[in-house]
Image (cartoon, rainbow, N blue to C red):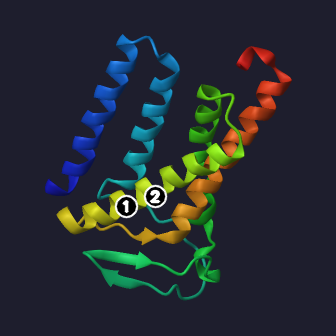
Amino acid sequence: MIRWLPFILVSILWVSLSLRDWQHAQRRRIWWWLGCWGLSTLTWTPVALSFGNSVGQIQTFWWAGGIWVIWPLQPASIDTSFWLNILMTVPQGIIWQYDHSHHRWRQWLLAGLGVGLTLEAGQALFNRLVSLGRWVDINDVITNCLGVVIGAAIMLVLQRRYQTLQ
């Protein structure tokens, strides 16, 4: 049960932020918090799904209560889960651009790095505190960032094509 504590506490945080924005009529921002909750569900629960199907060895390290991958883009690490990590953060990029239509690629990059670093730092911290049992992977930071940038670029194209999405 203690391994679920980080997810429960973070869920309370997302709910409180969503309710605050609901009261202040900031409806667009609620989508951001819901997206954060979805990502924390995928990454900060003690249930790890593995879609890896690559053949090869990934160099890992045991540190601070978890397994770490610190060498980016090892051939064996570019598998199905690599691509799914991009895909899972595309909606956050769409939401970011929808909420901040005046922002462009530098802000997208910072938002993407923020998402990726937050998710992986949370996994590292929760591994240390409650033995979450999740991998801390530099590739996930890269792919999460790329997903946000791709999502924001998609939304920008849609906003330019359909002016009602501003």
- Per the rendering, the mark at residue 18 is none
Q: Which residue is mark 1?
A: 121
Q: Indicate left or right for 32 with 56 as reference.
A: left
Where does residue 39 sit, x and y in percent of width and height? Answer: 44, 46
Where is 130 relative to 31, above or below? below
Q: How many marks?
A: 2
Q: Nearer the viewer, residue 82 or 166?
A: 166
Residue sitting at 57 percent across and 50 percent down?
110
Residue sitting at 69 percent across and 29 percent down?
102
The quadrant the C terminus occupies is top right
Residue sitting at 41 percent across and 61 percent down?
120
Where does residue 96 sit, x and y in percent of width and height? Answer: 59, 35
Residue sitting at 30 percent across and 74 percent down?
66
Mark yes or no: residue 18 visible: yes
Where does residue 130 sit, x and y in percent of width and height? Answer: 18, 62
Q: Nearer the viewer, residue 2 or 136?
A: 136
Badges 1 and 2: C-beta atoms under 8 Å apart? yes
- The amino acid type of the residue labelled 2 equals Leu
Q: Secondary structure at mark 1?
A: helix
Q: Indicate left or right for 73 with 24 as reference.
A: right
Q: Secondary structure at mark 2?
A: helix
Question: Which class describes the residues within 10 Å of circle 2: few (<14), some (14-19), or many (20+)?
Answer: some
- The amino acid type of the residue labelled 1 equals Ala
Q: Which residue is mark 2?
A: 117
Where is 38 relative to 66, above or below? above
Mark yes or no: residue 88 visible: no
Q: Classify residue 129 by image quadrant.
A: bottom left
Question: Which class describes the residues within 10 Å of circle 1: few (<14), some (14-19), or many (20+)?
Answer: some
Q: Classify residue 30 by image quadrant.
A: top left
Q: Nearer the viewer, residue 29 or 55?
A: 29
Where is 12 relative to 72, above or below? above
